[in-house]
Image: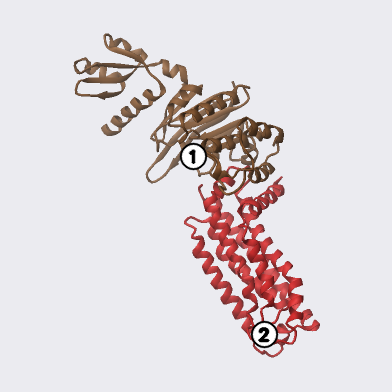
Chain colours: A red, B brown
Amino acid sequence: MKNGNIMNLVRKDLKLSLHPATIIYFALASMMLFIPNYPRPIGFLYIIIAFMMMFSTDLQNKDREFTSLLPVSKSDCVKARVITICSVEIAMLIVSIPFAFLAHRVLAGMENVGGMNINVTLYAIVLLGYAIANWIIIPGGYRKNFKVNLRCIIALIVFMLVTVSLENLVCRPMEGKLFLNGTSAADIVRQLPVLAGAIVVYILINLLICVISMRSYEKAEI
Amino acid sequence: MSAILEVRGLCKKYPSFELKGVDLTIDSGYIVGFIGRNGAGKTTTLKGILGLTHADAGSVMAFGRDFRQNENEVKQSIGVVFGEFGYYPDKKLKAITKVFKRFYNKWDDEAYRGYLKKFELDENKRVKELSAGMKVKYSLALALSHNAKLLILDEPTSGLDPVSRDELTDVFRSIVSDGEHSILFSTHITSDLDKCADYIIYIRSGEIVMQGDREEIIGSYRLIQGGRNDLTPQLRSVLDGIKETPFGFTALIHEKDLYLAEGLSIANADIESIMVYSEKLGHSEGSEA
């Protein structure tokens, strides 16, 4: 029943808490890949606004009060929320992959003067950006006096700074690191360990977020 | 009678308020009215029982099991209504129910349909489109459809018109009529309890000051009225609350002390007068202290 409860809570978050406008931000990430001369990670930033709306409407909907009356533990509530947010982020990245291939073909031969190319490194950078944004937003949601809008604005700014800085680093010709901005099959293969490293960091940070948030929520009074 | 909820020594200290060792027992098949003025500690007690706040001390046993140790299992058999249903105002009832029912092992769809019909609830309506009374009824429909044996209702009739309140008290009576369900019903609208409560628990300044059978409590008090000269020191010392005017007084007196009120006008008390006069006594005791 424990895992069943977490899945039921994820379903609750998706059906009752996730803002309907999330689908727009979801689509935006894929569509913005087609914009020429554009900093690539920025298209993936907008989903953070959807999470801001999610936490914000939770307050209006008295979601915390509703959930506290259900036969579920506080730790399950936190786990479910982290799973929901990570699922949306990962689903968005997965959905954008076919569009990334398409955009790569559409923009073939055009150098991206606005930033890096569309490749596996881009996804690694975005994952790191999401891990940091989640770190800023989620634990705050389980503390007293959660200023959701402020935290989300900070998360947006930090996401932008971190990802664009990493993008600039990738674009800068560094000895032996040129493959990071490449789009050839050989370069993509060499980028896979970078993505694997980003996935590990993403998972570890989100696990830590879970632990910290659970501690805060256990202390919270409703 | 078997106790389905037993609270012993529940304490919770806030900077400006303290719950002082609350003891209460709810038996199966009864409606228990939990009364007290605003800020007396009704909601704090209910939240403490449900573990929504961290009690400083005390124990809560529900259905013979420790609430804290078996919270998820116990909550399967408890339905809670905190005021009207104020959650997810933009969502349709059917969307909320679809999510809600997955958490309960004993959800009964047929019973739920029955309650929707009985309460004339339209599942396609959004929460914000329901009247205050309908919101309470929706909460009850959810609670009863997962076969909750104990309903904990915090001020469910506050803000309702008299007709809706009357309808709800009828609903409460029909819920407990099978002897399997119990209701703990906090309110400061004591007239609702006159209609439906079997037992009364009265909390004042975070302390339970009275609990027992409603009829016995009502039967053990009288309201007396007299002129200023009738208020002898001996009589004053036994009164459970007094209202003085320039012309005389009215007061609450225990039945056993009635012999001191011979010759005075005597009337039956009700829950409201017991609460109002007791609050005056509490206030004067507090002032003396």
A47 vs A147, nearest the viewer: A47
* Host chain of mark 2: A
Discs 1/2, front: 2
**Numbered tag placed on residue A177 in the rendering:** none
Q: In the image, residue B19 lies at what x, y percent?
A: 43, 38
Q: In the image, residue B123 lies at what x, y percent?
A: 64, 40
Residue type for callout 2: Asn
Residue B62 visible, this angle: yes
- Tally the numbered discs: 2
Residue at left offset 66%, top offset 78%: A35
Query: Which residue, given by chain and number where applicable, does mark 1 sit on?
Result: B57
Q: In the image, residue B269 lies at what x, y percent?
A: 38, 18
Instruction: Confirm or deny contact between disc 1 and disc 2 (CB under 8 A).
Output: no
Q: Residue furthest right?
A: A185
B1 vs A22, nearest the viewer: A22
Residue at left offset 47%, top offset 20%: B214
Q: Residues within 10 Å of mark 1 (few under 14, many from 20)?
A: some
Q: CA distance from mark 1 to mark 2?
A: 65 Å
Q: Secondary structure at mark 2?
A: loop
Residue type for callout 1: Ala
The image quadrant of residue B42 is top left
On the picture, is A188 further left or further right than B226? right
Residue B28 visible, this angle: no
On the picture, is B82 further left or further right than A185? left
**Numbered tag placed on residue A112 in the rendering:** 2
Q: Secondary structure at mark 1?
A: strand
Residue at left offset 55%, top offset 24%: B170
Q: Quadrant of the N terminus of chain A?
A: top right
Where B116 sits versus A18, above or below? above
Where A93 sits versus B241, above or below? below
